[in-house]
Amino acid sequence: MFSTADTIVAIATPPGRGGIGVVRLSGPSAHVLARRLIDRHALLQPRHATLATIRRPVNGAGESGGPFDCVVVTYFPSPASYTGDDVVEISAHGSPVVLKAIVGFACDAGARVAEPGEFTLRAYLNGRLDLLQAEAVADLIDAVTPQQARAAFDQLNGTLTQTIAAIDGALFNLIAQLEASVDFPEEGYHFLEADTLATSIDGILRRTGGLLADAGRGRLLREGMQVAIVGAPNVGKSSLFNALAGAGRAIVTEVPGTTRDLITETIDIDGVRVTLVDTAGIRETDDVIETEGIARARNAVGVADVVLLLLDRSKPFSPQPLDPLVERHKTLLVATKADLPAAWRRAECVDVSSTTGAGLDDLRQRILQAMDVEPAYDRPEITNIRHIRLVERADTALRRARNAAIAEGGSMPEEFVLADLQEARGALEEIAGKRAPDDLLTHIFSTFCIGK
Ligand SMILES: Nc1nc2c(ncn2[C@@H]2O[C@H](COP(=O)(O)OP(=O)(O)OP(=O)(O)O)[C@@H](O)[C@H]2O)c(=O)[nH]1
Ligand SMILES: [Mg+2]
């Protein structure tokens, strides 16, 4: 079981240095602890920025500590805070050394270092957010493209929560009517005729179907896609990788076998998060390092959504047997070095030059087409695979309920229909976390970073 009885502390800003860094305290003693850190007797005024000086704690010899940093402290009383607990945010100078020391002072004063995601977990436990909104917080922080951020913020803002609640509400009404006819059979008539029941279920099915219709694209938007760049040594894989990534991440030389390890970079193609993977050129070799690199290249192909198979257009075409791994994937044939005189041409290839940038836009569009996305217009409501699976479960149960309702001319006992409708409700309620077991919560929140 999770507890909100103690006071937790963590650095809320990312690792590294910055103008300011924030240490966040949450819990029943947050206010008292913060006042101890800044040696202040008066209460902090709620939601007001207060300039203060953090002091080193009194040491073992009873010597009072000197000033440590000049900070701005803001107190958010429960329940109107991020977590729903009393929260104090301390904005200090953004040095990891300073921030870690403040966390240490807070712990000396009785706080406990927060677990990953524990602030957001508390917000969930205190009813500030439902589970899908808590998941949206993580998605928003992880967003790489503006579209991802928008979809995550919509969910945090409650759009999906409302859609699911509306479906759940319709189900609740239907179940209530059905239960009435089960509870009062002696009244001698059905509150709901089989046809009416089926029509009502159809209405709900249209809503779950609407959500699921977009789910594939939603998932792609959230999770992004992996694109592996493969081909023989020296065809220009690393050059293309650098050109698409807009940075000189990978080493490029005229020596075949330059790249030995996988290099990845996440880029934004029209709002879709694309992880590019540069790989070692595949060839027969005795070099142990290169052999390992080639094994890694094959693994990268194994998990890729799309493979770019590069062929050097400036050299005579040497048809190679396609690697069976590549063959199983959505593969785009890319003819490289299009700025040099062409030794061959093939209609099925995208011609690109990493040197001049020619053909890169075309290649980007072909990558998206390979995954069947039209990103600019996409605003899918549902993006998270956990939510999608649960809506699918509800949808399946609703279909069963509908079939049961009209089976045998509507003479099927209502209990059968009811059981399926209840199951559909159960699945929908799991999305917002109304019935979330502890291990699910642990699983979800452990993927957060410390301080969130
Ligand atoms: N003219 C021209 N040269 C290119 C182009 N792309 C790559 N090259 C040259 O081709 C050579 C090999 O490029 P790399 O990008 O290192 O090739 P690679 O496929 O990563 O090679 P390995 O890592 O060894 O497998 C370098 O000398 C590049 O400058 C291009 O579009 N035009
Ligand atoms: Mg390379």
Image: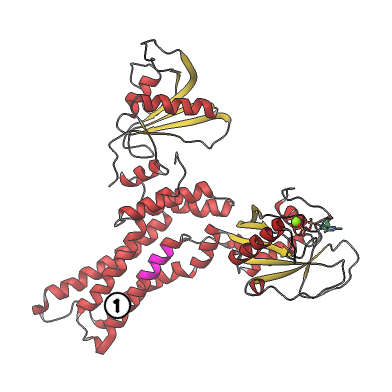
Residue displayed at 55% across by 62% down: 220
Q: Amino acid at mark 1?
A: Ala
Question: Is residue 316 visible to the viewer in this orientation of the structure?
Answer: yes
Residue displayed at 17% across by 80% down: 190
Secondary element under disc 1, as helix, strand or loop, is: helix
Residue displayed at 38% across by 15% down: 58
User: Label 1 belongs to which residue?
Assistant: 401
Q: Nearer the viewer, residue 230 or 7?
A: 230
Q: Is residue 114 left or right of residue 356?
A: left
Q: Position of residue 316 (x, y in %)?
A: 87, 71
Seen in the picture, residue 54 relative to 405 is either above or below; the reply is: above
Q: Is residue 87 magenta?
A: no
Q: Position of residue 326 (x, y in %)?
A: 66, 71
Q: Is residue 229 left or right of residue 203?
A: right
Q: Is residue 389 magenta?
A: yes
Magenta range: 387-393
Rendering quarter of residue 317: bottom right
Q: Nearer the viewer, residue 88 or 346?
A: 346
Q: Position of residue 147 (x, y in %)?
A: 57, 54
